[in-house]
């Protein structure tokens, strides 16, 4: 069981890091670009919120299969098919959790408005400099919200993992899958333990997030 | 001296924007006009925050012309916005040094700005814990520390309450005295213009309707300033003598000597006087036995009739009309009874003189 917990936390941590690194520039683009196509992109990012995870998982499985387009694209780089592997789970989690990370960060960038960046420019800050020293700190409550939501969603994800994970102990078997296993084999006590753990985790995450965010916002007011 | 040359044109909302002006390379140039006339847009174009077609040069440094557009972070401007817009995640010190750390040279030192703007007790505070006036002072300091060659101020008083306004005005006047770089100051408040500006550019619906030296502009017959209600002339003077017993100062101005309340004046100090047109009446012969202290020979330059029953006289101090300009507002009847005409020499009775 410890294995499963560690693997789950590892998956959520790696996914969250990838989400922050990829999602923050995307959120900035969505917040600031005058490009008319951006709402189309925003819709694609938001799809996982509405789609049944199995649908998302199905398409990811097709893409990652030995004949799939993602596999073909990665083959020249010497990367093996991702289906039923840990990296495959990371890709799936990133896609699945993207809207929960991008939306709060985008909102935070939009809420800060143009003024702070204009002030920074008149104070000789290059746009990239201003992004790191002004825009990111001002958006920190939104970034924190995004990170925690992304982490929590990845921990709780089930449908996508079910489709592309394969439930291999130590590699792709995460908490939500174990609970299913325990229930199917009638190990109610174990299922209870894990479920209680998840419940406590979810409660703590939401409470901690609310408190920290409140504090950050107060400081930035 | 690095002269400012600006010319911007483009479409702005419901009207065409076409603003061009030349301003001296030192002192305060006010861009004055009603809300929505495009004065803030002009200032944003100077900073490079907005891009319209046109040209801008500060002395021999060209920031915009047909082929080039220097991005805002490479222009040596200090910009003070209407709202202080301090960075909430940085302390007062962090805000002050933000631009300083990124500037190429180090002419203006932190300690200098702190003492000039009275920021000593505020350095460790968070912006959220400052009053409106304090915030705007930090914003001004932050702009100065970015080592600008040109300071831009966009209605820096308009977001403040009356207390904050008078607090900042004192500091702005102090800046006016010590600052060697030119300032472009956007405002719709004539009181601020009269106190701070040396040079004036009038804007209306995206056009320049007049530009020039403040004192000449205020008393120019062909501009609306001399005709408006509350019209006043602004005159520069130097305190010649203080009569402590009566609390009066004798101030030498071009073409006359004027007595005014001494306040904290000391001989040698420069003073900017504001004389309202309504406070100046005229007479053909020098009156005697009057309570009015300032009776000055003047020459009538121009007589402006308004739509109603009043006339505004543009006067030049001195019997030869060689001195500073003054405005007098009298009834149309008085004008006819006296039969005054341009070119004549009369006496102006000045009922009230105030510091601008």
Image: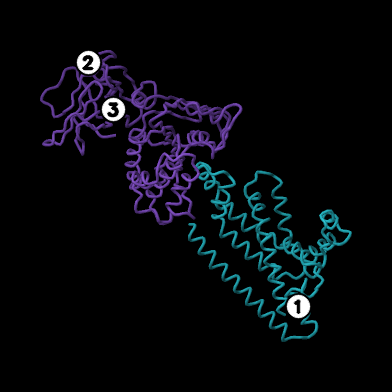
Q: Which chain is purple?
A: B
Q: Element type at marker 1? A: helix
Q: Are marks 3 and 1 in contact (CB under 8 Å)?
A: no
The structure residue drawn at horizontal position 74% and vertical position 60%, both measured from the top left corner, is A95
Say which chain is cyan: A
The chain ID associated with circle 3 is B
Of the residues under marks 3 and 2, which one precedes in the sequence? Answer: 3
- As drawn, the label of residue A178 is 1
> In this rendering, is residue A88 above or below B319?
below
Position in image of residue B11 (x %, y %)? 58, 31
In the image, B95 versus B301, the foreground residue is B95
Res B168 quadrant in image = top left
**Pointer 2: what residue?**
B319
Q: Secondary structure at mark 2?
A: loop
Q: Is residue A159 left or right of residue A152?
A: right
Q: Chain of mark 1?
A: A
Relative depth, front residue between B246 and B135 = B135
Q: Which mark is residue B235?
A: 3
């Amino acid at each position: 069981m410890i294995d499963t917990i560690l693997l789950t936390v590892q998956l959520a941590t790696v996914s969250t890091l990838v989400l922050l690194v990829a999602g923050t520039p995307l959120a900035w683009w969505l917040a600031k670009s005058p490009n008319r196509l951006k709402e189309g992109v925003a819709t694609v990012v938001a799809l996982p919120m509405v789609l049944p995870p199995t649908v998302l998982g199905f398409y990811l499985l097709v893409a990652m299969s030995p004949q799939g387009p993602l596999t073909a694209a990665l083959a020249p780089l010497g990367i093996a098919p991702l289906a039923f592997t840990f990296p495959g789970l990371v890709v799936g989690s990133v896609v699945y959790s993207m809207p929960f990370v991008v939306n709060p960060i985008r909102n935070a960038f939009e809420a800060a408005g143009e003024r702070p960046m204009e002030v920074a420019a008149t104070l000789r800050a290059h746009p990239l400099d201003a992004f790191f020293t002004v825009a990111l700190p001002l958006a920190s409550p939104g970034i924190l919200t995004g990170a925690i939501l992304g982490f929590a969603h990845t921990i709780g994800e089930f449908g996508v993992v079910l489709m592309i994970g394969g439930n291999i102990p130590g590699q792709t078997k995460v908490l939500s899958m174990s609970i299913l296993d325990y229930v199917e084999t009638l190990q109610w006590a174990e299922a209870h333990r894990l479920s209680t753990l998840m419940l406590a985790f979810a409660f703590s995450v939401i409470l901690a997030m609310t408190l920290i965010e409140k504090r950050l916002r107060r400081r930035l007011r | 001296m690095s002269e400012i040359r600006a010319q911007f044109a483009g479409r702005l909302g419901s009207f065409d924007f076409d603003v061009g002006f030349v301003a001296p390379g030192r002192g305060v140039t006010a861009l004055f006009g009603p809300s929505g006339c495009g004065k803030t847009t002009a200032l944003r174009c100077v900073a490079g925050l907005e891009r319209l077609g046109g040209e801008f040069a500060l002395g021999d440094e060209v920031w915009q012309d047909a082929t080039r557009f220097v991005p805002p972070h490479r222009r040596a401007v200090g910009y003070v916005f209407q709202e202080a817009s301090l960075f909430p995640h940085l302390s007062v010190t962090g805000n002050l040094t933000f631009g300083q750390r990124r500037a190429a040279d180090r002419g203006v030192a932190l300690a200098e700005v702190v003492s000039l703007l009275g920021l000593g007790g505020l350095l460790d505070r968070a912006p959220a814990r400052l009053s409106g006036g304090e915030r705007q002072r930090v914003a001004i300091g932050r702009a100065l520390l970015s080592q600008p060659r040109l300071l831009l101020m966009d209605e820096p008083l308009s977001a403040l309450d009356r207390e904050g306004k008078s607090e900042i005005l004192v500091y702005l006047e102090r800046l006016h005295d010590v600052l060697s770089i030119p300032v472009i100051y956007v405002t719709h408040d004539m009181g601020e213009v009269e106190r701070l500006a040396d040079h004036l550019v009038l804007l209306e619906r995206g056009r320049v309707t007049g530009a020039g030296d403040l004192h000449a502009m205020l008393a120019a017959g062909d501009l609306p300033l001399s005709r408006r209600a509350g019209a006043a002339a602004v005159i520069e003077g130097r305190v010649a003598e203080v009569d402590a017993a009566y609390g009066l100062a004798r101030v030498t101005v071009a073409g006359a000597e004027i007595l005014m309340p001494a306040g904290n004046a000391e001989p040698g100090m420069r003073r900017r006087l504001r004389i309202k047109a309504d406070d100046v009446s005229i007479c053909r012969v020098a009156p005697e036995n009057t309570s009015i202290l300032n009776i000055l020979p003047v020459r009538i330059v121009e007589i402006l009739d308004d739509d109603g029953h009043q006339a505004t006289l543009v006067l030049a101090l001195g019997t030869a009309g060689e001195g500073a300009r003054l405005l007098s507002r009298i009834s149309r009847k008085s004008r006819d009874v006296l039969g005054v005409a341009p070119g004549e020499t009369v006496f102006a009775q000045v009922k009230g003189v105030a510091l601008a």
